[in-house]
Image: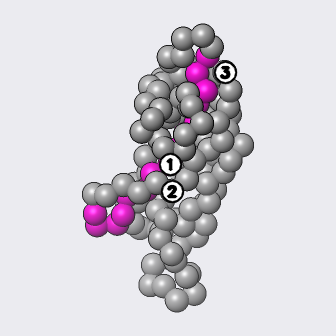
Amino acid sequence: MLKGRQVSSTNEMMASVGQCDPLHSNVPATKIEVTVSCRNLLDIDTFSKSDPVVVLYVQGIGTKEWREFGRTEMIDNTLNPDFVRKFVLDYFFEEKQNLRFDVYSMDSKSSNISKH
């Protein structure tokens, strides 16, 4: 995993990937859009700058299990990426919803994140 100094999103709210129908739910919910950018990532590649991608994980409500929700696009040779891909999540009011953003440098064509 690529360690960096800062990973930020334009929305600081916690969200989860639940299937929510606001018309038939007891918990008020809305959709939020999260964009991601990174600054001052470590340069861990040998012959070029890192090729970062961010993987968003959500934690199930009431569990400790993290599930992959989605990934940004990979941006070649940069330590300060501004990702275009946006994550659209359900935000449930009055509930704690945990997100985890992991940053990887993609060094092969494999989609298996453990190979990076």
- On the picture, is 9 further left or further right than 75? left
Q: Return the x and y of residue 96 as percentages of the image width and height.
A: 37, 61
Q: Is residue 113 above or below residue 97?
A: above
Q: Return the x and y of residue 52 as percentages of the image width and height.
A: 58, 30
Q: Sequence order check: which comes first, mark 3 or mark 2?
A: 2
Query: Does residue 38 appear anywhere in the picture?
Result: no
- The residue shown at (57%, 47%) is 71
Question: Mark 2 — residue?
Answer: 69
Q: Sequence order check: which comes first, mark 2 or mark 1?
A: 1
Classify mark 1: helix, strand or loop: strand
Q: Is residue 35 above or below residue 21?
A: above
The circle drawn on residue 77 is 3
Categorize mark 3 by other alpha carbons within 10 Å: few (<14), some (14-19), many (20+).
Answer: some
Instruction: Name the image quarter holding the N terminus.
Output: top left
Query: Does residue 116 appear anywhere in the picture?
Result: yes
Q: Quote the CA–CA distance across marks 3 and 2.
A: 25 Å
The circle drawn on residue 26 is none
Question: Mark 1 — residue?
Answer: 56
- On the picture, is 1 further left or further right than 22? left
In the rendered image, residue 59 lying in the magenta stretch gets the answer yes
Q: Sequence order check: which comes first, mark 3 or mark 1?
A: 1
- The residue shown at (36%, 55%) is 66
The answer to whether mark 2 and mark 1 are in CB contact below 8 A is yes
Classify mark 2: helix, strand or loop: strand
Classify mark 3: helix, strand or loop: loop
Categorize mark 1 by other alpha carbons within 10 Å: few (<14), some (14-19), many (20+).
Answer: some
